[in-house]
Amino acid sequence: MTILRGARPGVAALAAMALAASIGVAACGGDGGSGDGTFTAGTSEPDHLVPGNTTSSYSFSVLSGLFENLVGLSKDGKTVNQAAESITTEDQKVWTIKIRAGQKFHNGEPVTAGSFADAWSNAAYGPNAYEANDYFSYFQGYDELNPEDEKAKPKTDKLSGLKVVDDATLEVTLNEPFNQLPQLLTYPAFAPMPKAAFKDLKAYEDAPIGNGPYQISGKWERNKQVKLVPFAGYTGSRKPKNKGVTWKSYSSADTMYTDLRAGRVDVQQTIPAAKVPEAKRLLGDRFLPRKTGTIDYLGFPMFDKRFANPDLRKAISMSIDRNGINKAVYNGDYIVADSLLPSIIAGYRKGACGQLCTYNPAEAKKLYDKAGGFKGTLELYFSNAQPTYYQWMQIVANSLKTNLGIKDVQFRQVPASDYFSVLSKREEKGPYRQNWEADYPSAQNYLQNMWGSVGNRMGWETTPESKEFDGIIAKANAEANEQEALKLYNQAEDLAIREMPMTPLWTWAGQGGRSDKVDNVTITPYANGLLVHEVTVK
């Protein structure tokens, strides 16, 4: 991660500043108000602001300031206690959580063990249909709140695995031993909620009451903005160094970038790839590169017998020129995948994927012929969320035709709003683009959620290899020693690579920018994203 803190500008940066002056770049700060100690950050519109009812990174940007979880993440992805005083276990299945004393919600209510238990049960209760519902499936009692018959009303609305011992003590019982619980608890869905929230959840979403370093000013102005100001009663470690942030909603990243150049927004976390070369020139040291944990994959629908042979899947993987696509589409800024894990995740091994993720047309053709080739139309699925998807899919299609001799390759570009529904229903009839952004920085979060029998979309769970994979993951989850657990996660990774039900392509490059008005801007590759509390306003 690169953190730029007002370094002395070089020649290129001085030239950029001169050009910036001529086009009005950021000399006067964003809509948060010049000289009042506040700043403006751009974002896509959040979907929800009730913590358990969203899995959107756009919502997380706002929620990270409004709420404080039991556990947070340091800049390098290490877990740090926040609302928790301590989290302990003897068997990885039953955990005791002590709540740090003296914490309050923005309405003055004390933060207690019950604040977490109530919020988690509310999110896990099936009839509520919360977006993050399945993140609570690790807890005992989850199945009772989510009966197989969706029309059946659960007999209880409380997770039996949560026991409020007293105001300062929460006992958590899981279905199986799971050593990654502290990492899981960093996910925004696990924030606490005050009693006032449950009186009217719809009204609560308009003006969420959290326990974080910022409180909402007024209400969420949908499709416009969310204004946050420092909470005077905050007692945690993330004391704001500014007087507030306005999260301004955009429907277009290109428009957001235009506003960054014009000084109407002070921080953009992700600049569109096509604008990056220009942004590097114009912003100088205000261009903010960073590592990320987001990986693009090409998945294979193994429920279609045409893709059942692993040699065919390996041939397709080896026929893709990842380096060429990176240069042609992403300015060479992305990191070509050589593992199922990105480099920022503990357990990453350089070159773990070996030759199977290396461009080798000759060997790819040998494997393709060994597999008996491919009959019929090969359809490539991707969404219309980013124009770059179409660009690199064209290159992949040409590679499959040229290197493997597949004559009929067709595109199936699906509207972004429908794409995950197509994959969830397993309606795809060919390889499909998918990406994964860490919910929390753990090898388990990638491997089990994407390749495990519960989370995968490939149809791999019907194979003996998948069952073996699940068994290794279960052993890793129960292992108390972190290094021994990583060895087991790597063993599971090796098995998945040998089978190649899904092939990694590249890790995204984080490329943001800031205006002249702000400094000390850090954007992490994790769910907390922009560290709003650290931003200083000139």
Image: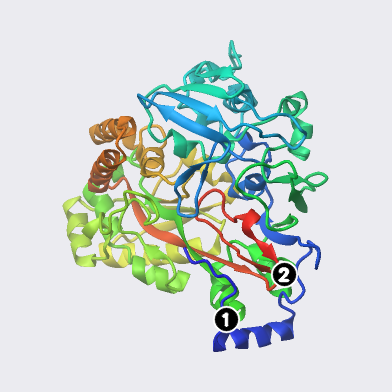
Q: Is residue 57 visible?
A: yes
Total labels drawn: 2
Q: Nearer the viewer, residue 464 or 276?
A: 276
Position of the C terminus, as image quadrant, is: bottom right
Q: Which residue is at 41% across, 73% downward? A: 327
Q: Is residue 146 left or right of residue 461?
A: right
Name the kind of residue labelled 1 in the image.
Answer: Arg
Above or below for 410 versus 190:
below
Viewer can see residue 440: no
Q: Quadrant of residue 385?
A: bottom right
Residue 189: quarter of image: top right
Nearer to me, 8 or 391: 8
Q: Give x and y (percent) for residue 54.
A: 61, 39
Q: Earlier in the sequence, mark 1 or mark 2?
A: 1
Q: Amino acid at mark 2?
A: Lys
Residue farthest to the front, as pictured:
101
Q: Which element type, helix, strand or loop, lies under badge 1?
A: loop
The residue lying at 23 percent from left, 53 percent from top is 373
Helix, strand or loop status at disc 2: loop
Q: Position of residue 195 (x, y in %)?
A: 72, 25
Q: Residue at x 38, y 51 (%)?
A: 345
Expressed as whole percent of the image width and height from the top left, the position of residue 315 reads 25, 56
Q: Which residue is mark 2?
A: 538
List x then y, in percent, for residue 366.
17, 59
Marks 1 and 2 sit apart, C-alpha to C-alpha, by: 16 Å
- Marks 1 and 2 in Cβ contact (< 8 Å): no
Specify the color scheme: rainbow
Residue 32's tag is none
Q: Tell me the number on the disc at residue 8.
A: 1
